Amino acid sequence: MVEVINVIEPIVRAAFTAGIYGGGAYLAGRLDKPGEPFQKKKFYGTLAVGGAVGLGCYALGIPITEASILGIFATIGGLEVGQKIIEAVLGFLKRIGIT
């Protein structure tokens, strides 16, 4: 039973952290766009990513601390930004007929 708790704890911690930061980002975004509705699917996705990060941390033996989780999410965010930039460049190249 103790082993199960050792697996579940990092998943719950990381998902909780993701939920807090995701909820905070949503609330901060509502200050800029007051009419934007809450998107449950996106929020659940954020929780799922947090849980996956927690499971990955457990599997790799990385301690679950705020710093480690934020570092991992920052890396994921950086990859997301890079992906959006590449998509924008490819879309631009397609519009001007290069690709």
Image (spheres, rainbow, N blue to C red):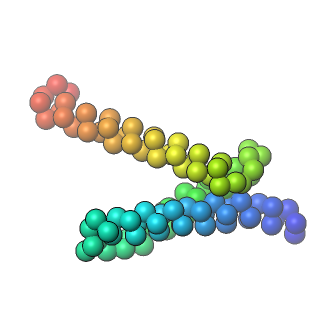
Q: Is residue 71 left or right of residue 41?
A: right
- Decide if residue 42 is in sight here: no
In the rendered image, the residue lying farthest to the top is 98
Occupied quadrant, residue 30: bottom left
Report the label total. Answer: 0
Tell me which residue sits at (32%, 38%) in the image: 85
Where does residue 99 sit, x and y in percent of width and height? 20, 27
In the rendered image, the residue lying farthest to the left is 96
Q: Is residue 10 left or right of residue 79?
A: right
Tell me which residue sits at (34%, 64%) in the image: 29
Where does residue 70 sit, x and y in percent of width and height? 58, 51
Occupied quadrant, residue 47: bottom right
Is 57 drawn above or below residue 11 in the view shown?
Answer: above
Report the quarter where the N terminus lies: bottom right
Where does residue 50 sit, x and y in percent of width and height? 58, 58
Occupied quadrant, residue 48: bottom right
Decide which of 59, 80 is in the foreground and name it.
80
- Decide if residue 4 is in sight here: yes
Is 73 drawn above or below residue 86 in the view shown?
Answer: below
Is 73 drawn above or below residue 10 in the view shown?
Answer: above
Q: Is residue 94 left or right of residue 3?
A: left
Tell me which residue sits at (59%, 62%) in the image: 17
Tell me which residue sits at (74%, 64%) in the image: 9
